[in-house]
């Protein structure tokens, strides 16, 4: 991979992120939309988990989740979140930090409409994070869900609207390339950082 230069980067970090995601997919990365989502509760206790970013649009990064899960409660408490992706075959990391809240209704509806049947059936079987007596109980709850159910009403989309985005690309000489976008009035600044 040639070194990353400022001229290679889109001035809009969400367009840049979407481009890198498409390149990761084209390079054969396994589920390149998987990213780590970090949140913290009102007391500052941090947690992180993997999610699938289902849409990277000019508005932000969108995921589907249980709207009363710990991550969604954190988002409601602090209004903030951060995402990170690592695409190993390309040696690239993407980081986004910003506000985390409910997605706009049209995007949420489109994402829920594209959600697969098995995911919807599994979501009806239990609330994210609730204690389960055992795998048989979980399977019984799913078996009770008939046919092709709609998404459960407690599922919806969160959107991370970034105000800070970083792109990082590995260099064989360990002098990696790293750029930070920061949101300012009317646009973005782009700065090269020490890796
Ligand atoms: C690769 C991968 C993708 C995942 N995608 C999602 C997702 O899109 N939405 C989601 O709610 N959980 C997803 N999960 C499960 C979460 O990591 C997590 O277990 C769950 O959301 C509960 O998180 P919380 O209790 O911190 O809210 C995924 C897990 C993995 C390993």
Image (tube, grey):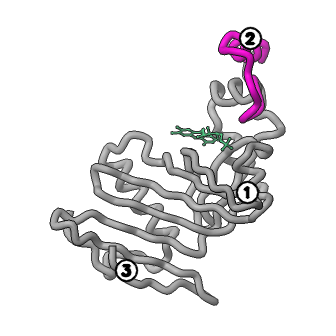
Q: Nearer the viewer, residue 36 or 106?
A: 36
Label 1–label 3 contact, CB within 8 A:
no
Q: Which residue position holds label 3? A: 193
Vertically, is 183 above or below 137?
below
Q: Nearer the viewer, residue 99 or 134?
A: 134
Q: Which residue position holds label 2? A: 140
Residue found at x 72% / y 35%: 129
- Where does the N terminus fall, quadrant-wise? bottom left
Residue 41's disc is 1
Q: Secondary structure at mark 2?
A: helix
Task: Name the quadrant containing residue 153.
Answer: top right
Look at the image and say whether residue 141 sits in the magenta stretch. Answer: yes
Residue found at x 75% / y 60%: 43
Part of the protein shown in magenta = 125-145
How many callouts does the rendering have?
3
Instruction: Please tell me which of labels 3 and 2 falls first in the chain.
Output: 2
Is 186 placed left or right of 130 in the picture?
left
Residue 82's disc is none
């Amino acid at each position: 991979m040639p070194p990353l230069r400022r001229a290679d980067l889109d001035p809009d970090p969400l367009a840049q992120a979407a481009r890198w995601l498409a390149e990761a997919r084209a390079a054969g990365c396994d589920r390149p939309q998987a990213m780590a989502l970090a949140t913290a509760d009102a007391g500052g206790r941090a947690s992180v988990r993997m999610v699938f970013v289902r849409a990277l649009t000019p508005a932000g990064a969108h995921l589907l989740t249980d709207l009363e899960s710990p991550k969604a409660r954190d988002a409601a408490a602090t209004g903030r979140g951060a995402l990170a992706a690592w695409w190993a075959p390309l040696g690239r990391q993407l980081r986004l930090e910003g506000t985390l809240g409910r997605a706009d209704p049209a995007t949420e509806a489109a994402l829920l409409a594209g959600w697969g049947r098995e995911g919807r059936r599994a979501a009806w079987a239990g609330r994210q994070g609730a204690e389960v007596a055992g795998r048989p109980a979980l399977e019984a709850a799913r078996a009770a869900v008939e046919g092709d159910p709609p998404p459960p009403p407690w599922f919806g989309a969160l959107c991370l609207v970034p105000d800070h985005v970083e792109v990082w690309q590995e260099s064989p000489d360990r002098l990696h390339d790293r750029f930070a976008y920061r949101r300012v009035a009317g646009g973005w600044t782009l700065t090269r950082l020490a890796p």
